[in-house]
Image (cartoon, helix red, strand yellow):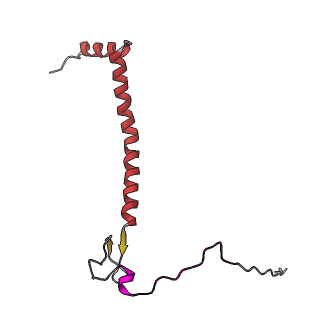
Amino acid sequence: MQRPIPWIWITALALLLLAPGFTARLFVDVLEGFTLLLVFGPLVLAGAGLLAWQWFKSRMRVCSVCGTSSLATAQCPACGAVFDQAATGSPSPRQEPAAADAVIDVQVSEVKDRD
């Protein structure tokens, strides 16, 4: 059985949209907000995901003994090795001089082409 086309509702909706007034403006504003949400929503979620990934990645530690990754712990959950270098008694990493204080010696030498 075929349903009849709801011409009354179509006409009422067309009059609301075409007639200048509060309801037409409200409908257009709601439609505009929904469209902006559909367009910019995924972009905002992608940006938030990228920031969360960078935060998560900065707190990851890799164990130098077994290679297991863990999240901001003082001890490796797999092998029990201590991540803190001060606790293991190992020497501190070598301090390099600042780039502004470094001296670069340049020696000029002539290069002869073989023809």
Task: Confirm whether the magenta stretch covers residue 91.
Answer: yes
Task: Confirm whether the magenta stretch covers residue 110.
Answer: no
Name the residue located 37 percent from the left edge and 31 percent from the top edge: 33
Q: Is residue 102 above or below residue 51?
A: below
The total of numbered circles placed on residues is: 0
Residue 94 in picture, x, y percent from top left: 52, 83
- Name the one closer to the observer, 63 or 17: 63
Q: What segment carries the magenta color?
A: 83-102
- Prevailing secondary structure of the magenta residues: loop
Residue 6 in picture, x, y percent from top left: 23, 16
Residue 14 in picture, x, y percent from top left: 33, 15
- Name the one closer to the observer, 6 or 106: 106
- Name the one closer to the observer, 59 or 25: 59
Quarter of the image containing the C terminus?
bottom right
Quarter of the image containing the N terminus?
top left
Name the residue located 39 percent from the left edge and 87 percent from the top edge: 89
